[in-house]
Image: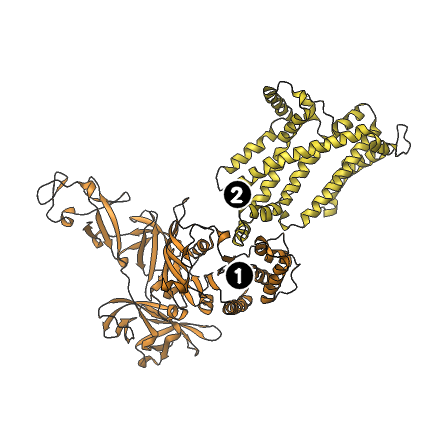
Chain colours: A orange, B yellow
């Protein structure tokens, strides 16, 4: 119980599956939020961040898991009985009421005395710098002012947790920056727990105490802004937070790593021979004269970005994006050097694609009605085929309905094609990350499997592709 | 020769139409309302209207009948429109159609059918003239109430309900404080499309073998007796009532930004 004192809200194994289309928006989401923390859910659209927020607010019920507020299960308590208030994406101010009535809405429901309501409303209006707006109608306010009213309307109820669903999304850049700082100040003054949803990584880095990076309904990493930026846990986080160069590589010795055609010193202690993904932030690359760098390359583009230049250097088959305050000339030969702490090593996830198949009457494998040729006698030791039937080493007939064969294949052995008839399965590209010399794609098949495919060519997000999997690259194993 | 018309020229046919069939007849009615049988100016038609207990009685009765009909329509139509607008059911347009299609069936046929149904339930309709007037009119005018309400409620922003719930309101409070006030434009246009016809549409009552006398019947009887002057005055008074009614309706409407689409 002791460790619970600090946590205001805990989400345990939250899963949300919509019954109408079977879509799983959030799966096995776990989070602990400390009292007074500023937590941000960050991720691309459709990653489940808003759904999670809506479950905390009480607008949606999780399919599985529980939500604890101060240690009490509130999973089944309706939104109007939770001490939590929300600032909505489109503000959702009541158009038929003036500003005063909008802010006083929650207080009037609590049947507070009139003068107390007036005092509280005036107080929050003062806090958001909109004194004297009581009698204005919602439609006469600008976007930024409506935003402040929406915040005031939520705060006046003195919630234990304030939820903010992309509250700055509809504002212009300058206004957004101002509001970011104001919200941050408000958070510090009030001491209320803020849970914030955004797809803007910069916003998340600026404002939060803790960031939850989400993708495809799953938590990718939870940590402080510094952790998330400097020590991304996987390629998705590295790619999503800030700009980064991601390379496939291998550990070649004690704190030595080889990638991008060169060998570098690094600070991460990973056993020799481990396959890794190396993340290099563009601002960490040091440009040197050609002969002094670890790797050499040719400048292919230079773009002026205000405070720095964005320089792209091609080195062999690799490409590195660099941010530098000094300009370079396109076509020049340059060297590239990296400080050990400028390299972040992530142990490469096993991206081998695995799927389960059944055996058809011709003694071949059946994967969603597609046939894969396979010599079953090699998969099941000691078995023989006689008269189109399979017998084990004791001469007993094997019941084909009872066994399953697992097929595995490496991401680089799968080819993508836009001829939808060409491959074994078709699917849609739902994610892509550039890894220095090739792209790593996640393809979701029509049957709902997510397969990782490496390809050197650029395909677009949401492209419909067919996956060609050569049978000689497949590995077969009997499912136990 | 090339035919090029300015906007003004294109407006001429419509202006002519309006003058011939709207403005001119209105003046004719005003003329008759303020003259007697021999064509001399008089306000006796007006004083007659407000002193004749018969006319006033009919006015009150029509008002009560129209009010009851409107309430019945509203009570049936609001839940229907609300459920249809809120549901994510694919077949909801078909359900809406079921309510709307009777409008496409000939009016005479519909009322005759309704009469037969009512006869099944009640041997002698004439004993309950008020009740069967309300049933007949509600049946006839119900689609006019459902449609504007449905249009308003489908455009309703669901996040407002969530906001109200978030601020502590239960489902009933959310409905009373947010949904209902924001659907007033729909209610107003629905009410004006049911209430005003219900004051005057005596054909429904006639066809139901109903002896009830409403404003429409009164105008009809004056005109069939060639008393155009009194008939016109009654029409004019009704017009004034309508004008006052719509004036207040529109004012309430302007208060609400959600008015779009509610006026059919």
Give the left or right position of residue A218, taking residue B186 as reference. left
The crowd level at tag 1 (other Cα within 10 Å; few <14, some 14-19, many 20+) is: some
- Kindly identify which chain the residue marked by label 1 belongs to: A
Q: Considering depth in this image, is B60 or A214 the residue closer to the camera? A: B60
- Residue pointed to by mark 1: A158
Q: Residue furthest top?
A: B123
Q: Considering depth in this image, is A154 or A298 the residue closer to the camera? A: A154
Give the left or right position of residue A40, taking residue A474 as reference. right
- Residue pointed to by mark 2: B86
Callout 2: SS: helix
Q: Considering depth in this image, is A420 or A190 the residue closer to the camera? A: A190
The crowd level at tag 2 (other Cα within 10 Å; few <14, some 14-19, many 20+) is: some
Query: Image quadrant for the N terminus of chain A?
Result: bottom left
Q: Residue furthest left?
A: A394
Q: Residue at x 17, y 40 (%)?
A: A399
A373 over A431 or under it: above or below: above
């Amino acid at each position: 119980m002791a460790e619970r004192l600090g946590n205001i809200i805990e989400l345990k194994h939250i899963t949300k599956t919509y019954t109408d289309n079977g879509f799983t928006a959030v799966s096995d989401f776990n989070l602990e939020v400390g009292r007074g923390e500023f937590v941000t859910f960050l991720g691309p659209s459709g990653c489940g961040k808003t759904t999670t927020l809506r479950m905390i607010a009480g607008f949606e019920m999780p399919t599985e898991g529980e939500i604890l507020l101060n240690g009490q299960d509130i999973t089944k308590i309706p939104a109007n009985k939770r001490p939590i208030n929300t600032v909505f994406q489109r503000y959702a101010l009541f158009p038929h009421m003036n500003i005063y009535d909008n802010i006083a809405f929650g207080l009037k429901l609590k049947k507070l005395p009139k003068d107390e309501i007036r005092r509280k409303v005036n107080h929050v209006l003062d806090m958001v710098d909109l004194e004297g707006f009581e009698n204005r109608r919602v439609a006469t306010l600008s976007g930024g002012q409506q935003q402040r009213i929406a915040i005031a309307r939520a705060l006046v109820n003195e919630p234990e947790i304030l939820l903010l669903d992309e509250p700055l999304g509809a504002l212009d850049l300058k206004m957004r920056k101002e509001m970011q700082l104001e919200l941050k100040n408000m958070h510090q003054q009030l001491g209320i727990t803020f849970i914030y949803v955004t797809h803007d990584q910069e916003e998340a880095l600026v404002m939060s105490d803790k960031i939850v990076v989400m993708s495809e309904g799953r938590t990718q990493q939870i940590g402080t802004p510094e952790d998330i930026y400097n020590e991304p846990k996987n390629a998705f986080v590295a790619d999503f937070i800030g700009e980064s160069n991601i390379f496939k590589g291998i550990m070649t010795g004690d704190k030595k790593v080889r990638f991008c055609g060169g060998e570098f010193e690094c600070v991460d202690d990973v056993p020799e021979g481990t396959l890794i993904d190396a993340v290099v932030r563009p601002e960490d690359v040091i440009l040197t004269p050609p002969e002094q760098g670890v790797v050499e390359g040719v400048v292919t583009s230079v773009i002026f970005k205000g405070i720095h230049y964005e320089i792209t250097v091609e080195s062999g088959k690799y490409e590195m994006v660099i941010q530098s305050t000094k300009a370079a000339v396109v076509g020049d030969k340059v060297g590239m050097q990296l400080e050990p702490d400028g390299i972040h090593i992530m142990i490469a996830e096993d991206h081998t694609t695995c799927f389960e198949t059944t055996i058809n009457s011709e003694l071949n494998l059946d994967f969603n009605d597609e046939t894969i040729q396979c010599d079953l006698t090699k998969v099941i030791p000691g078995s023989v085929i006689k008269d189109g039937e399979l017998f084990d080493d004791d001469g007993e007939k094997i019941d084909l309905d009872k066994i399953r064969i697992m097929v595995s294949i490496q991401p680089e052995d799968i080819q993508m094609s836009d001829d939808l008839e060409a491959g074994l399965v078709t699917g849609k590209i739902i994610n892509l990350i550039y890894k220095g010399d090739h792209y790593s794609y996640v393809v979701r098949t029509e049957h709902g499997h997510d397969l990782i495919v490496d390809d050197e060519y650029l395909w677009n997000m949401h492209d419909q592709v067919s996956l060609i999997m050569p049978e000689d690259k497949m590995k077969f194993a009997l499912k136990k | 020769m090339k035919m090029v018309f300015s906007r003004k020229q294109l407006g001429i046919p419509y202006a002519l139409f309006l003058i011939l069939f709207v403005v001119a007849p209105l003046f004719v009615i005003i003329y008759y309302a303020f003259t007697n049988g021999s064509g001399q100016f008089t306000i006796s038609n007006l004083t007659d209207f407000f002193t004749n207990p018969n006319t006033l009685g009919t006015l009150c009765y029509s008002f009560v009948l129209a009010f009851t009909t409107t309430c019945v329509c509203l009570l049936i139509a609001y839940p229907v429109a609300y459920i249809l607008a809120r549901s994510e059911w694919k077949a909801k347009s078909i359900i809406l159609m079921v309510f709307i299609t009777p409008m496409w069936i000939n009016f005479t046929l519909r009322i005759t059918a309704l009469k037969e149904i009512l006869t099944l339930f009640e041997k002698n309709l004439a004993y309950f003239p008020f009740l069967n007037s309300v049933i007949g009119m509600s049946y006839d005018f119900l689609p006019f109430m459902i449609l504007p309400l449905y249009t308003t409620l489908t455009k309703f922003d669901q996040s407002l309900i969530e906001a109200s719930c978030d601020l502590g309101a239960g489902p009933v409070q959310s409905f009373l404080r947010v949904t209902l006030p924001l659907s007033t434009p729909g209610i107003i246009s629905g009410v004006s499309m049911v209430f005003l016809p219900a004051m005057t549409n005596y054909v429904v009552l006639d066809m139901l073998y109903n002896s009830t006398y409403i404003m429409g019947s009164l105008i009809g009887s004056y005109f069939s007796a060639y008393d155009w002057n009194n008939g016109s005055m009654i029409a004019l008074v009704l017009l004034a009532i309508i004008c006052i009614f719509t004036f207040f309706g529109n004012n309430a409407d302007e208060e609400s930004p959600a008015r779009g689409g509610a006026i059919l």
